[in-house]
Image: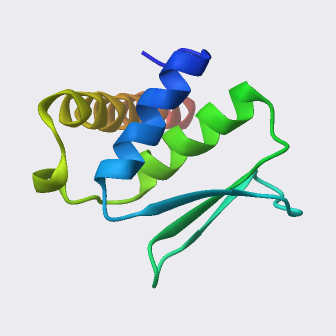
Amino acid sequence: MIKYTKHFLNKLEDLFAESDYVLRYEKGNFKSGFCVLKNTKIAIINKYYPLEGKVNSLVEIVKTTDMDESLFSEKVLELYKEIKELNKQQSTLESLKEEDHQV
């Protein structure tokens, strides 16, 4: 479950700290609030984004990238799998909605 708290943001930051991605907060004109430089595995979050935007951006990055699970501690791995499962559930719901509209 996604929580918009500083504590949950810290958990997401811990996930990135244990991953092979570098997380940086920078100022910039990012339309979506973040950008990922795939070749160098750097995730950049707009530092002026509010807490909710930072959490959403980090969750979206986790959902859309594959990270090396072997690097994670047990707690971080649990969070990583939880976020990935949310992504699967959302994809399934979207597929069902599309099927309903086609019928």
Residue 100 is at least partly visible in this image: no
| Above/below status of 17 relative to 28 | above
Residue at figure coordinates x 31%, y 56% from the top left: 19
Residue at figure coordinates x 45%, y 35% from the top left: 12
| Above/below status of 31 relative to 3 | below
Where does residue 73 sit, x and y in percent of width and height? 16, 38
Where does residue 71 sit, x and y in percent of width and height? 16, 54
Lateral position of residue 19 relative to residue 44, left or right: left
Residue at figure coordinates x 60%, y 32% from the top left: 55
Lateral position of residue 48 relative to residue 13, left or right: right
Where does residue 67 sit, x and y in percent of width and height? 28, 58
Q: Residue furthest right?
A: 29
For the N terminus, which image quadrant? top left
Q: 67 or 93: nearer the eye?
A: 67
Q: How is the image coloured?
A: rainbow
Lateral position of residue 41 relative to residue 45, left or right: left
Q: Quadrant of residue 99?
A: top left
Number of labels in the image equals: 0
Q: Residue furthest bottom?
A: 39
Q: 77 or 90: nearer the eye?
A: 77
Q: Quadrant of residue 92?
A: top left
Residue 23 is at least partly visible in this image: yes
| Above/below status of 58 relative to 69 | above
Where does residue 27 sit, x and y in percent of width and height? 84, 59
